Amino acid sequence: MTAGARPATALSIAGSDPSGGAGIQADLKTFSALGVYGMACLSALTSQNTVGVRGVLEVPGQFCAAQIEAVLDDVPVDATKIGMLGGAATVRAVARVLAARRPELGTLVLDPVMVATSGDALLEDGAARVLIDELVPLADVVTPNLPEAAALLGGVEEADDVAGMRQTAVELLGLGPRAVLLKGGHLDRGEAVDVLALSRDGAAPLVLEWAAPRVATRNTHGTGCTLSSAVAAFAARARTAGAPAGAESSGTASPGLESPGLDDAALTAAVRSGKEFLTRALSEGAAWRLSRTPEAGHGPVNHLAQTLR
Ligand SMILES: Nc1ncnc2c1ncn2[C@@H]1O[C@H](COP(=O)(O)OP(=O)(O)O)[C@@H](O)[C@H]1O
Ligand SMILES: Cc1ncc(COP(=O)(O)OP(=O)(O)O)c(N)n1
């Protein structure tokens, strides 16, 4: 790295998963694996493991916002990922600071976390409305799974095939984000298909899909967190390298400066690279038996299987 240059940076605003598979822990591992300097503002603590969520302790909204302000006042951020926020007050406080400082957040990836794989709720009733109205329009990419997409659209029926996913992703653009990555992990088919809808000024949205072989494993805890943080990391690398996102970009930038935004091709490349990273993390952790009772829950992916410099 050039003397005085800084590494690509990414900030996660999310909850803690002490078992290390999801949340802030997954995000920081993913940022590190991708050679990006990771930072984290905690929105909530959970007591959870691979089996389920036992409890949630919210961080007061104002303190969550204060963490974000402290980072932004000091370090240029190339990409921001938002995960579990927990309560309506936290969503509101985070939205207020992010709206005021949107140009300083870099590429903004919003994972609208509502429910864990275990079925436990991770977003308070009533908080979804605030998230839809105040956070979704700020995002470059929103990454719902199928139940979250249906909830964001007001409780419509979930898409149950790829054609339905394409339609749902385009409908979600109506909430105001630049792009929607609709995740198809919950679809019952042999491939894991994700759909990207990208809005384009004055033209019909661009709709793309990526299919990966479905990995036969129970170790799927934190897949959504890992995917969204990988997309943020690849976006950060692309912004700082001024080159298309991908493993080959060097990911460094001038000190103290904000990095330039991504065009549609570079944003699409960051999403595609994120999906490839997640698929490999899943397959490389597929045979892990981390838990004492692996059949009772869902183990994590192998975030560190591919470490880029
Ligand atoms: N068994 C699997 N094999 C391969 N990819 C998977 C598998 N399960 C989920 N995925 C992928 O993991 C990502 C997260 O998907 P999903 O399970 O839909 O979201 P969430 O984890 O938020 O519930 C998506 O890219 C999805 O296609
Ligand atoms: C603290 C915390 N944040 C998010 C999740 C949910 O993780 P996600 O990757 O969206 O989904 P699952 O694959 O775990 O459903 C979590 N469990 N904890």
Image: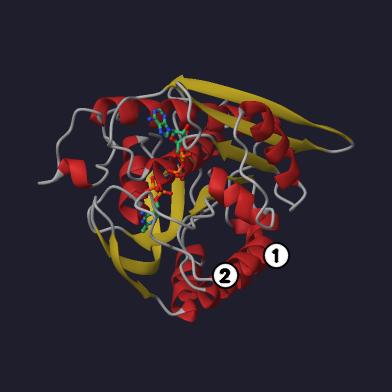
Where does the image place residue 248, in percent across and percent down from the top left? 44, 22
**Crowd band around label 2 with a 10 angstrom C-alpha radius: few (<14), some (14–19), many (20+):** some
Q: What amino acid type is highlighted by mark number 1?
A: Asp
Q: Is residue 214 above or below residue 99?
A: above
Secondary structure beneath dot 2 equals helix
Q: Is mark 2 within 8 Å of ligand 2?
A: no
Task: Pick out the residue farthest to the right.
Answer: 202
Query: Which residue appears at 24% of the width and 46% of the height?
Result: 297
Q: Quadrant of residue 266?
A: top right
Task: Pick out the residue farthest to the left.
Answer: 292
Q: What is the number of the mark on residue 116?
A: none
Residue 302 seen in the figure: yes
- Tell which of 244 and 204 is nearer to you: 204
Q: Quadrant of residue 223?
A: top left
Q: What is the number of the mark on residue 133?
A: 1
Residue 107 seen in the figure: no
Query: Which residue appears at 61% of the width and 55% of the height?
Result: 151
- Tell which of 181 and 233 is nearer to you: 181
Callout 1 touching callout 2 (CB < 8 Å): no
**Left or right of residue 269: residue 308:** left
**Left or right of residue 43: residue 28:** left
Quarter of the C terminus within the rendering: top left
Q: What amino acid type is highlighted by mark number 2?
A: Ala
Of mark 1 and mark 2, the one earlier in the sequence is: 2
Ligand 1 picture quarter: top left
Q: Is residue 38 above or below residue 189?
A: below
Quarter of the N terminus within the rendering: top left
